[in-house]
Image: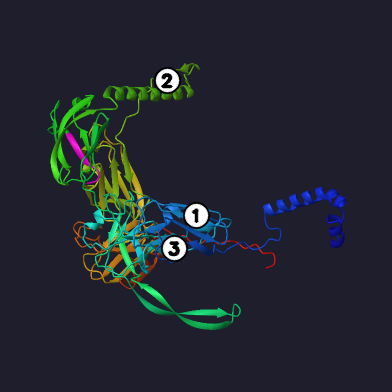
Amino acid sequence: MDMNKLKRFLFGKSDVSRMRRLPVFIILGVMLYSCASIGRIEGGPYDEEPPVFVQSTPKPGQLNYKRDRVTIAFDEYIKLDNAGEKVVISPPQVQQPEIKTNGKKVIVNFQDTMKADATYTIDFGDAIQDNNESNPLEQFTFTFSTGGRLDTMAVSGVVLNASNLEPVKGMLVGLQSNLADTAFRSLPFERVGRTDSRGRFSIRGVAPGTYRIYALQDADQNYFYSQPAEQIAWQDSLIRPRYEFRMRQDTTWIDSLTIDTIIERQYTHYLPDDILLRCFKEISYNQRLAKSERLTPQKFSLYFTAPADSLPLLRGLNFDERDAFVVEQTTGRNDTIHYWIRDSLLYKRDTLQAEITYLETDSLGKLVPRTDTLRLQSKLSYEKQRKQKQEQDEKTLETLRKEAKKKKKRDADGNVIEPAEPVLPTEFLPVDVYAPSSMDVYDYITLTFQEPLARIDTAAFHMQHKVDTLWQDIPFDFQRDSLDLKAYNVFPNFELGESYLFAVDSAAIQGLYGLTTDKVKQEFKVKALEEYGTILFDIAGADSTSFVELLDAQDNVVRTVSVVDGKADFYYLTPGKYGARLIADKNKNGKWDTGDFEKHIQPEMVYYYFQVLELKANFELQQTWNLLDRSLDRQKPLDLKKQKPDEKKNKQRNNTNR
């Protein structure tokens, strides 16, 4: 259309012509607004720039500010993302301030009385975002002082989980100028920071001096260690903030390939910047009886809040407790104990009364004897259990009758022969047999039962090796599992690539309540040598107390070996991806141990091999592993980390001119 004609049509000289054209203006305006609401007609680029600071009250770094309200303005409309977790204020606030947005402004209303002569730092992290595209303003910090001095020192570092070197997100890290150990348990932190998704933290606005540094999972938000369930960390050495001048190069470009100028600029760098804190949870020694229950007539259970060194003493009040039970400690630590009742006359009783004496933690944290009376009533009475069994048997018989009628038989004269009354099938003691068809050469057979056993006839066990076409008996060891009372292991000496047969005669095993097992027959083949791979580690920096855990791609332990003469060798591995973790086992108990703040014991050291290894069949990987060639926060491979870093959101460009 001719633009001049359009102008004359829309903007005629006379008032009458303008009035006549008023509906056209309205329609055109609605159309333009609708188009603008939907999106950019021209397909212009998305906004990828974060908000820009414009002004504030007080001014950045202002001294002697006495008001309890801070207002910060930006160049566009903004919003706050999860301010309750991301925004950290120093000194820490007992009453959390009100943090809100109003158009292009962030407003912070302090609820606590402002401290005199204190530097206040509001660390927003990446909580401030523009309203439309959610572009975050990264690492934005605002500082002012209520006195005549502005403290500008900063300390920074990283917090890792001590047991697996995972970065810990959202952990509170604080400085305390009171150097006494009791301060961590009684005084709020003086300056604080919070860890990001990489476990990194920075504490700003720090005054010169000497400090202790702590990390705390502050569940009750009081800024000191008051809950045993809170994760903690501390550094043994003292922190002395300092700074130094460094030089950096600023480069300006003529275009994407041509440098214009390189200018060296001096800047202030704050130290220490490499603090490493390994957080852990202390073992809770608050020991008490949590509950007792008797879900079935044959068994009752006791649950304690912490492990004990000995079993509780049990005395029957309406029964004789001597040789009355088979005691099962499921964890091997006495915190969960199952009592299987041997005598049918005893478990047929709906209620058992007993007196139990055990150790309980008192108000002073000491273990003292306590005696309670237990009333152990079965939730499922023996009579109801018996009726349920009868009903199930009747349903089974009815099913068998219907199946027999479907298979009609006739005599020689063609008359229908009535089927005989069906008989219930023999009920056997259930057993789960672990003997996979493709067996690892280092593996063994496991039999798992649902109840303790009364009798085992190992003469009825048969382990055979196939030689050519014949089966030959071979020796084996038979042992009860060290952790599970109801599991038993069979240990033959397997040969690579060979076939085997494991069999158990019927009635060879009898359960505590009379049932016996059916016959067992399981044939399998051991994997051949060429189906395996090998990983050999030569380790520098490890002593003879250390052990190495081989890990799968999900950071789960696959196998464990001790370090011997600086070596940790893993043979007969299934092809796949593996990581490795070394534990410096100082007390030689074969496991990783946590720390103890009162005893000044740090958790045992953990190191990771810096990469995930991909092992192929019939391959051998020999790796050199120096435990100290990189810092702990750079050891664990990203593929093994469950806490992934929060990457900056990428905005897809939609530019038709490109």
Labels 2 and 3 touching (C-beta < 8 A): no
Determine whether the residue tagged by mark 1 lies in a helix, strand or loop.
strand
Q: Nearer the viewer, residue 254 or 267?
A: 267
Q: Earlier in the sequence, mark 2 or mark 3?
A: 3
Residue that numbered label 1 is attached to: 80
Q: Mark 3, residues whose alpha carbon is within 10 Å: few (<14), some, or many (≥20)?
A: many
Q: Quadrant of the N terminus?
A: bottom right
Answer above or below: position of 422 versus 483: above
Labels 3 and 1 touching (C-beta < 8 A): no
At 21% across and 64% down in the image, what residue appears?
545
From the top left corner, tell me how far across and down residue 556 is, in percent.
Answer: 35, 56
Q: Is residue 329 magenta?
A: yes
Distance in Å between CA atoms under marks 3 and 1:
15 Å
Q: Amino acid at mark 1?
A: Leu
For the residues carrying marks 3 and 1, which lies nearer the camera in this image?
3
Q: Earlier in the sequence, mark 1 or mark 2?
A: 1
At 44% across and 23% down in the image, what residue appears?
404
Q: Mark 2, residues whose alpha carbon is within 10 Å: few (<14), some, or many (≥20)?
A: few
Q: Which mark is residue 437?
A: none
Determine whether the residue tagged by mark 3 lies in a helix, strand or loop.
strand
From the top left corner, tell me how far across and down residue 438 is, in percent.
Answer: 38, 53
Residue range in magenta is: 325-332
Q: Nearer the viewer, residue 162 or 405?
A: 162
Residue that numbered label 3 is attached to: 142
Q: Nearer the viewer, residue 643 or 482?
A: 643
Q: Mark 1, residues whose alpha carbon is within 10 Å: few (<14), some, or many (≥20)?
A: many
Q: Earlier in the sequence, mark 3 or mark 1?
A: 1
Taking 353 as reference, is 502 left or right?
A: right
Residue that numbered label 2 is attached to: 419
Answer above or below: position of 295 versus 597: above
